Amino acid sequence: MLSSLFFLAMVSVANADESSFTIVAERQPAPFEGVLLSVPAAAEVLTKYDEQQMKCDLEVEYQMDRAGTECKLDKDLLNARVDTLNKQYDEIVAQKDLEIAKYKEVVKKQSPQYKWLWFAGGVVLGGATYYGVQQAIK
C-alpha cells in the first residue's frame, strides 16, 4: 500500500514517464541507471516543494496584510487631518462672521446726522482744496 501511494506521488510530482521511473524492491536490480532514494528521503524531496510553496504563500499573505494595514493607517491619518482642517476652517469662518457682525453693529450705531455731517465736510474740504490748487497754479 505504501509503495503504491509513493508511486502515485512520485508520478504526479515528478511528471516522469514510465521508462525513467520505477519502484524497486529491496535487493532487486534497477532497470536503468540513476539515483536511488529511501522512502523517507523521497518523501522529503516530494514534500519540500509543498513546504516551500506554503511558506511563500504565507509570506505573500503576510506582506499583503501588512501593506493593507499600513494603507488603512495612512488613510485614517489623512482622514483625521482632513477632519481637523475642516474644523479649523469652520472655526475661522465663524470667528470672521462674528467680527463682520460686530463691525456691522458699529456702523449701524452711528447716527444718520453724523453721516451727513461727514459728507458735507468732505464736499467742503474737497472744494476748498480744488480752489486752493487753482489759485496756486495761476
Image (cartoon, grey):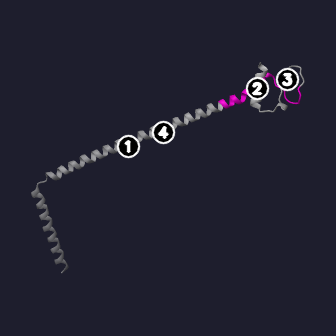
Q: Position of residue 17 (x, y in %)?
A: 81, 33
Tell me if mark 4 has few (under 14), some (14-19) or many (20+) residues whose alpha carbon lies within 10 angstroms of its own: few
Residue depicted at 62% across the width and 31% down the height: 58
Please give the range of residues in magenta: 30-54
Q: Quadrant of residue 85?
A: top left
Q: Which residue is mark 4?
A: 74
At mark 4, the secondary structure is: helix
| View extreme (left): residue | 113
The residue closer to the viewer here, 78 or 112, is 78
Q: Which residue is mark 2?
A: 8
At mark 2, the secondary structure is: helix
The question of residue 44 being in magenta is answered with yes
User: What label does residue 85 carry, if any?
Assistant: 1
Sequence-first tag of 3 and 4: 3
Q: Position of residue 117 (x, y in %)?
A: 11, 61
Sequence-first tag of 1 and 4: 4
Q: Nearer the viewer, mark 3 or mark 4?
A: 3
The residue closer to the viewer here, 92 or 46, is 46
Q: Which residue is mark 3?
A: 24
CA distance separating discs 3 and 4: 61 Å
Tell me if mark 3 has few (under 14), some (14-19) or many (20+) residues whose alpha carbon lies within 10 angstroms of its own: few
Q: Is residue 82 above or below residue 110?
A: above
The image quadrant where one finds the C terminus is bottom left
CA distance separating discs 1 and 2: 66 Å
| Amino acid, disc 4 | Asp
Sequence-first tag of 1 and 3: 3
Q: Are marks 1 and 4 in contact (CB under 8 Å)?
A: no
